[in-house]
Amino acid sequence: MKVPITREGYEALKKDHENLLSVKRPQILKAIEEARAHGDLSENAEYDAAREEFQFLQKKVAEIEEMIKNSEILDVKKGDGETVEFGCTVKLVNLDTDEESFYRVVGPYESDIKKGTISITSPLGRALMGKSIGDEVNFNAPGGKRTYEIVNID
């Protein structure tokens, strides 16, 4: 099954992949070589740490390659500003706290709540899709039931 992603998200994955292969991997391999030069590998903490870091890097590279392979770029079309669609930014007001928040609705590979992006597969993302300005959105968050009102859609 293909996973939706914005063009920017796809390009960011490819850039991250390239950085891991062309910058991080050579740095780690150099650290392994330097640690090897220190002699006895059985009691060499630097060597063990560098090998562990290399294994972590290899796993991360494989994960990103899998994401790239499973991604389907959905070009974000200029919406009507009336309904929540993939790629749009939504301004919400929490009806319990009056707190405002902005979220861009994206695919799961690029969602990062700290960056203001939420996945269309998240509880809030699913609740928002297809809704309009003025609609109330109810969903179950990890901290309990939440109710937001959609104030604006870009």
Image: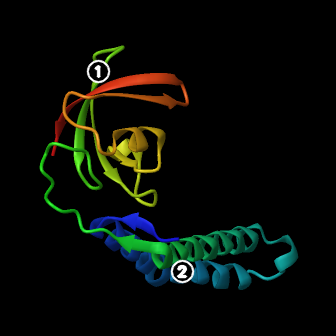
Give coordinates of residue 4: x percent, y percent.
Answer: 40, 65
Q: SS of the residue at dot 1?
A: loop
User: Residue at the right extreme?
Assistant: 42
Q: Amino acid at mark 1?
A: Glu
Assess disc 2: are there few (<14), some (14-19) or many (≥20) residues with their C-alpha within 10 Å of its C-alpha: some
Name the mark on residue 99: 1
Circles 1 and 2: CB distance less than 8 Å? no
Q: Amino acid at mark 2?
A: Arg
| Residue at image coords 55%, 30% | 142
Image position of 94 with respect to 105: above or below: above
Number of numbered discs overlaid on the protein picture: 2
Query: Depth check: 9 or 46 in front?
Result: 9
The label nearer to you, 1 versus 2, is: 1
- Relative placement, left or right, of 136 versus 80 is right
Give coordinates of residue 5: x percent, y percent.
Answer: 37, 65
| Residue at image coords 27%, 55% | 87
What is the spatial separation of the Cα atoms under label 1 and label 2, in whole angstroms? 44 Å
Image position of 59 with respect to 123: above or below: below
Query: Depth check: 58 or 4 in front?
Result: 4
- Relative placement, left or right, of 18 versus 130 is right
Q: SS of the residue at dot 2?
A: helix
Which of the two discs, 1 and 2, labels the residue nearer the N terminus? 2
Residue labelled with disc 2: 25
Q: Image quadrant of residue 132?
A: top left
- Relative placement, left or right, of 37 versus 119 is right
